[in-house]
Image (cartoon, rainbow, N blue to C red):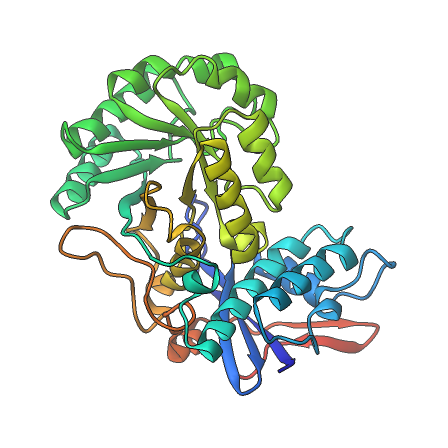
């Protein structure tokens, strides 16, 4: 079969707030081929990603992503790999291309799984899907009291782990950070797994980041996530040499396999966090998972939007028995909740599983797509290159 159409749907909450919450808008991707339909999601600013799909060619290595996708043969796993390689070669200088490709790649896996009657994780070569331990992914409260309440709520809801991130953490004093961490620990209780996300707040300031280490150790945090921006590998390595049993986590900003490899090889992270909606899709995320196993680094999914994206994020490491920590958003905006008909529920043991259903096993709710759709039209020289498609 051949890829007949690829459609992008820009969805958004009525108001997007200036907070570290990626569930406020979404870019949904629909691929059609051979009578089948697959769905994916990009984790990136929607409009630049749409533009990368259909922008006019700049030169031979800066072509729109669509030139490498539409009309391509799609009969097996090798075709998805081939299409991804073609996009990277033809759109080498189009820096948004990997983000756009991510949603397309996810949709291709979903479509192929439906055609072959197999869940994506089986198409990736895994014989078994292992349960994952979800951590409640929340933002730090504006005050320690709010953080305490969030920790208690996570514990009451049965989560064995929770990650607190962004908000005021790292932005004022070391003492204030300690209060936030103590509140998180108290809320989770002594046995809860505490994870901390600094949200790149220290950029590449190793000395300032190191000041937070004593409080992180005191509160028995498992990891410190993204203390620095993705490319600050020297800073990551310098801090990793000081953390002791506390490990660094990072990688969600990687938008190709080489960035992920550099994070593991040169950054000294103990946990590599990969977002299928950024790195180039499920295909590249699986490469990163394989590399992590070879290097003794723990693979963790990164996702903060819908359960379609959550399912996609689980596929690349579904068959890894020892890599069990799983990000599980618990404070998504209504858009992210309503976007899919079904959701990945925790089982009686509090674990989540990659769906044992064809494709991703998650269906979009088209009524919600219509509800949150932002009409877009892009024209160049009077010619319309893109208009929001029919649902």
Q: Is residue 60 above or below residue 217?
A: below
The residue depicted at 15 percent of the width and 38 percent of the height is: 152
- What is the quadrant of residue 313 in the picture? bottom left
Looking at the image, residue 206 lies above or below residue 341? above
Against 213, is 95 above or below?
A: below
Residue 186 position in % (x across, y down): 16, 28
Q: Is residue 361 left or right of residue 100?
A: left
> How many numbered discs?
0
Judge by depth and name the residue closer to the eye, 336 or 109: 109
Q: For this rendering, which residue is in front, 157 or 280?
A: 280
**Residue 46: x and y, percent?**
57, 60
Q: Residue furthest front?
A: 127
Residue at 29% across, 65% down: 343
Q: Quadrant of the N terminus?
A: bottom right
Q: Nearer the viewer, residue 117 or 299?
A: 117
Is 144 on the left-hand or right-hand side of 291?
left
| Residue 64 seen by the camera | yes
Residue 118 location (% of width, % of height): 41, 72
């Amino acid at each position: 079969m051949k890829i007949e159409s690829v459609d992008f749907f820009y969805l958004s909450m009525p108001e997007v707030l200036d907070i570290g919450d990626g569930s406020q808008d979404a870019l949904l991707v629909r691929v059609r081929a051979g009578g089948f339909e697959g769905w994916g999601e990009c984790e990136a600013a929607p409009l630049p990603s749409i533009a990368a799909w259909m922008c006019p060619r700049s030169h031979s290595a800066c072509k729109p992503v669509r030139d490498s996708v539409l009309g391509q043969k799609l009969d097996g796993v090798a075709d998805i790999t081939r299409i991804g390689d073609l996009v990277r070669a033809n759109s080498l200088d189009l820096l948004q291309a990997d983000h756009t490709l991510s949603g397309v790649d996810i949709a291709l896996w979903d479509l192929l799984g439906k055609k072959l009657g197999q869940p994506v994780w089986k198409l990736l070569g895994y014989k078994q899907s292992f349960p994952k331990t979800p951590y409640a992914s929340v933002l730090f409260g504006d005050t320690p009291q709010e953080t305490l309440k969030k920790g208690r709520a996570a514990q009451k809801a049965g989560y064995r782990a929770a990650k607190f991130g962004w908000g005021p953490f790292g932005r004022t004093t070391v003492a204030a950070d300690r209060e936030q961490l103590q509140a998180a620990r108290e809320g989770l209780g002594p046995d809860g797994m505490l994870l901390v996300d600094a949200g790149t707040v220290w950029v590449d300031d190793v000395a300032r980041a190191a000041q937070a280490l004593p409080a992180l150790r005191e509160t028995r945090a498992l990891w410190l996530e993204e203390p620095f921006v993705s490319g600050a590998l020297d800073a990551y390595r310098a801090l990793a040499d000081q953390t002791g049993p506390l490990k660094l986590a990072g990688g969600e900003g990687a938008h190709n396999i080489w960035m992920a490899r550099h994070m593991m090889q040169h950054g000294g992270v103990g946990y590599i966090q990969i977002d299928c909606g950024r790195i180039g899709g499920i295909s590249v995320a699986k490469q990163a998972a394989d590399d992590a196993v070879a290097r003794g680094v723990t693979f963790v999914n990164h996702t903060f939007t819908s359960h379609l994206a959550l399912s996609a994020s689980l596929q690349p490491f579904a068959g890894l028995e020892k890599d069990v920590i799983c990000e599980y958003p618990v404070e998504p905006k209504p858009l992210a909740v309503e976007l899919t008909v079904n959701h990945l529920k925790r089982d009686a043991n509090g674990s989540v599983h990659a769906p044992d259903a064809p494709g991703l096993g998650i269906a979009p709710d088209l009524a919600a797509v219509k509800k949150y759709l932002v009409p877009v039209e892009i024209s160049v020289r009077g010619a319309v290159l893109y208009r929001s498609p029919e649902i």
